[in-house]
Amino acid sequence: MNSFLTIKEIKEKLARKEVSVAEVSAFYQERLNQYNPKLNAALEIFDNPELPNDKTVHGTLGGIPCIIKSNISQKDRITNAGSKILQNYKAPYDATVTARIKQAGAVSLGSGNMDEFAMGSSGDFSAYGPTHNPWQQGRVPGGSSSGPAAAVAAGLVPFALGTETGGSVRHPAAYCSLVGMYPTHGHNSRYGVIAFASSTDQVGPLTKTVYDNALVMSALSGFDPLDSTSVQQEAQDYTKELDGKLPTGLKIGIINDGVQTDGLDPQIRTSFNGALEQLKKLGATVKSINLPHFKYGIALYFIISRAEAASNLSRFDGTLYGARSEHMENLLDMYLNTRQEGFGIEVKRRILVGNYVLSAGHQDQYYNKAQLVRAMVRAEFEAAFNDVDLLVSPTTANLPFKIGELVNDPIAMYMNDYYSTANCIIGTPAISIPCGFSQENLPIGFQLLGPRLSEQLLYKVAYAFEQSTDYHLRFPGGFE
């Protein structure tokens, strides 16, 4: 088998009976075992993956291997969220998204490495060591879904599930030349997903192509009564309108306030401008749109996500969940030492900020004001979507940087999410697509952003762009 086959191509081989499900699974298990020591993309590779029965081989994802980020529950498998405090935790049930891809016939081969509790923009902050970018192994693959992205980019699995709170699927997608989708908040169930910031967390697929991404998203879609924020929507087939053409009269708005920033890498600006020209050639009308509050997205994310993280992670104190320190003389020692020993530096940093903005005397000054500005950003985006169908911007401001380069500069690290936080704060979807490579052969991506529940339109436009370029046909060397 070719190491970089898409889901669609593997399904065709299975349908022609050129290979069996067991052979496909064994092929990717071998690749994971061979290359994971170079990438540290998987925290666990299953010796005994759960293969589908004959009835599900022909499902949407029948017989297709994957890995799942380690903050998404897989029944009876270690689900540690990249943290020492959950190092031996075995999930007693499948998350809804895990159950749905299994029902569609997918085969999980392991759990993906990640920044601890999904907190990071690089893949540097896993308690089990950093993930390496297959395109240049001394550089980061983007976070926090670093392991799932690296595994797909290196051809170790055809697809992976990641999670995103402020860019953690799209960011590694851009750094690894993949397609990554952040859906409308509530589109995919969060039941069984270990929470970081509940009002923005979403599960999203990482794939080589737009078609594959739409296929996985179709399997994940549909209302879930176990998630109170789940959108009341029937399951969708997002592949049905992928014909390589843009909708007639499509209008796309360039987020002027984002593209004009001085911090954008010149090589990314060049590739982004090339993508705009390609969209025009395909028939889109492109115009500049001013979103004056767009720049506040990163500040809002900084306040709201930390506040929710401090609340969500307060349960890990040695009493009911996770590890418990052995160094204690009283109850207070147990609380303090468990959290001191169990959490890494980035998690502690975010909990401290979260508790600060929620504390007496500061809640009105920071958290409540952030919620007001959040409403202003939402109103601004809604007004923009009365004028254009979609918005567009680069996915990241910088190229993949060296592992460890920004670990001691958290502000610079946080600014990597500049383009990907505003839509997460208001819960609207966006998709990152490859649009070029730097002179050093590092991947570059751009993103399309749409109004709530516009996933079908995003996939249709992204697919038309992808089919008119060849970026999705290039793969990192050394993993053949």
Image (cartoon, rainbow, N blue to C red):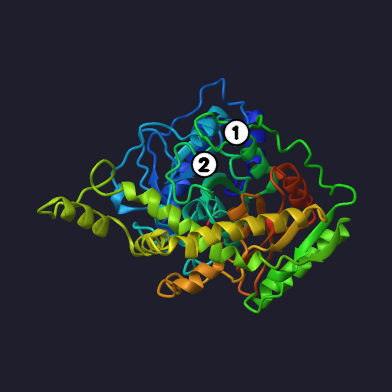
Tell which residue pokes out farthest to the top in this image: 55
The CA span between labels 1 and 2 is 10 Å
Q: Amino acid at mark 1?
A: Leu
Report the number of numbered marks: 2
- Asked if one can make out residue 148 in the rendered structure from this viewpoint, the answer is yes
From the image, which quarter does the N terminus lie in? top right
Q: Earlier in the sequence, mark 1 or mark 2?
A: 1
Residue 344 as seen in the image, left or right of residue 111: left
Tag 2 residue: 66
From the image, which quarter does the C terminus lie in? bottom right
Q: Position of residue 339 (x, y in %)?
A: 26, 55
Q: Residue at x 42, y 54 (%)?
A: 309
Which of the 4 image quarters holds residue 407? bottom left
Crowding near the residue tagged with mark 1, few <14, some 14–19, many ≥20 C-alpha atoms within 10 Å: many
Residue 115 as seen in the image, left or right of residue 213: left
Q: Residue at x 89, y 56 (%)?
A: 283
Q: Is residue 403 above or below residue 456?
A: below
- Asked if one can make out residue 114 in the rendered structure from this viewpoint, the answer is no
Q: Residue at x 65, y 38 (%)?
A: 215
Q: Residue at x 84, y 49 (%)?
A: 246
Q: Nearer the viewer, residue 284 or 30?
A: 284
Q: Amino acid at mark 2?
A: Cys
Residue 48 as seen in the image, left or right of residue 156: left
Which of the 4 image quarters holds residue 254? bottom right
Q: Position of residue 104 (x, y in %)?
A: 57, 29
Tag 1 residue: 61
Are discs 1 and 2 less than 8 Å apart at CB?
Answer: yes
Q: Is residue 190 above or below residue 209?
A: above
Crowding near the residue tagged with mark 2, few <14, some 14–19, many ≥20 C-alpha atoms within 10 Å: many
Q: Nearer the viewer, residue 318 or 167?
A: 318
